[in-house]
DNA sequence: TTTTTAGCTGAGTGCACAGTCACCGAAATA
DNA sequence: TATTTCGGTGACTGTGCACTCAGCTAAAAA
């Protein structure tokens, strides 16, 4: 690769890196291409030499990001001893990149179709891991025989809700950190019966 | 009231009515003031004679709307025989104005502070009704002794999640209708223990 | 060394939008 | 009837944005 090609790739990577930062900070919808260019220290026009439009940029960023997440999830699934452990590890992972996940949770309904499908597909893969583990647990008599899909929706819906309203619940710090134990314990309560039971 | 005052009030009400329709259809963020004026059959400028700016318009609409909702809730609380009944009635109410609630769920994180606080305050009042009923149920030994706030958050978080992604889950019709029974039964399962229990 | 190529530049373009204001005409008042 | 008042009008303004393109310069090729 000659000097020109090297420089070009370097610029491209700089744009991706800077865009991800700005995007995590202010969201995709509220980040302008000029902002990204300025933060990266390049001309506004340069951005469009590397990406056809703003949308192509975000698609590429998320493609990379979601790949890494998928890998983390894969690792997490094999490492976790049980469902509770898996949920905790998952929440930890969300916490590590909480700004980004918060933005995604908030902005997802406004993204163009292509982007939405991309994100929701990855999301469904993660859900299916939880689904399987719960299903297996029910068969083993470990969990109550509830409707698994609904239970998983409750879990992911709630997490998504906390993430999307992150900056309402807390001004700084982590929402996941704040609600982690409550999410885990409430979900555990939901799927088991031996805990918090009350005589009628 | 003379002819002029009558006409003025009529125009004002026309704007409010039209704006609410447009707002339910496309959301507040994606509705332009020109659109509203055009749909209402008035000049663009007229809108700003009645409301200082776009934001004042939406604040007024929501103020009226949220008042009606609060009244409905009050009625609902007194009518409902038990928690399950109350939840069903609540979901029915959401379903009746589902377009609007879906917009609110999606756009809430992007609203200016004043508006957000307005909505969240009303929301917290509704939650507190459920909180009380569950609390009472636990004392009466009817429900498991779980962390009430968390349980309520699970419920409202999930409902909010379904509403915000309404147009992803379904293309037309009602999300609430589609998931109503699953939400009710899953939440009932969560707070009670005598259902779906499995021997360990 | 001279010529060509290609990544980068940033002022410029077009567009969408919220909000303005000089003017109009019908209703109210004198 | 003559004058004033005021709700309504819509072309216009200012702003912010994504995206463009003629020109520049340094690297690559001749």
Image (cartoon, coloured by chain):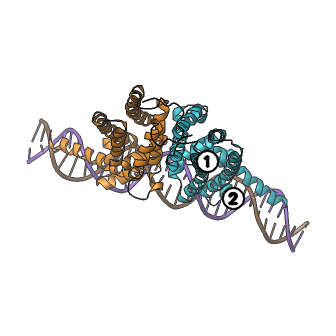
Chain colours: A cyan, B orange, C brown, D purple
Residue found at x 41% / y 44% = B184
**Mark 2, residue position:** A50
Q: Nearer the viewer, residue A105 or C14?
A: A105
Marks 2/1: CA–CA distance: 43 Å
Judged left or right of residue A45, residue B167 is left
Q: Percent x, y for residue A54?
A: 60, 55
**Mark 1, residue position:** A133
Residue found at x 33% / y 42% = B89
**Disc assigned to residue B37:** none
Q: Chain of mark 2?
A: A
Task: Tell which tag, 2 or 1, sits nearer the viewer.
Answer: 1
Q: Secondary structure beneath disc 1?
A: helix
Q: The C terminus of chain B lies in which quarter of the figure?
A: top right
Residue found at x 47% / y 31% = B149
Say if mark 2 contacts mark 1, CB within 8 Å.
Answer: no
Report the residue that reaches farthest toward the front.
B199
Q: Is any part of residue A42 visible from this angle?
A: no
Q: Chain of mark 1?
A: A
Q: Is any part of residue A80 visible from this angle?
A: yes
Could you say which quadrant of the image residue B71 lies in? top left
Q: Nearer the viewer, residue B158 or B70?
A: B158
Q: Earlier in the sequence, mark 2 or mark 1?
A: 2
Q: How many marks?
A: 2
Q: Secondary structure beneath disc 2?
A: helix
Q: Percent x, y for residue D25?
A: 79, 56
Q: Percent x, y for residue C12?
A: 59, 57
């Amino acid at each position: 690769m000659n000097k020109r090609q090297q420089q070009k790739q370097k610029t491209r990577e700089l744009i991706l890196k800077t865009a991800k930062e700005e995007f995590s900070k202010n969201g995709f919808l509220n980040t302008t291409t000029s902002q990204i260019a300025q933060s990266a220290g390049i001309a506004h026009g340069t951005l469009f030499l590397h990406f056809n439009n703003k949308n192509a940029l975000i698609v590429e960023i998320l493609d990379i990001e979601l790949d890494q997440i998928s890998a983390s999830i894969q690792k997490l699934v094999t490492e976790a001893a049980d469902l509770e452990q898996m949920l905790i590890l998952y929440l930890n992972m969300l916490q590590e990149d909480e700004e980004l996940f918060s933005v995604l949770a908030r902005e997802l309904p406004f993204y163009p179709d292509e982007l939405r499908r991309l994100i929701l597909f990855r999301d469904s893969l993660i859900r299916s891991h939880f689904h399987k583990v719960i299903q297996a647990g029910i068969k083993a008599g470990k969990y109550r025989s509830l409707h698994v899909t609904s239970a998983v929706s409750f879990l992911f819906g709630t997490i998504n809700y906390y993430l999307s309203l992150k900056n309402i619940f807390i001004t700084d710090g982590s929402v996941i950190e704040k609600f982690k134990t409550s999410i885990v314990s409430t979900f555990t309560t939901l799927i088991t019966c031996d805990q918090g039971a009350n005589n009628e």
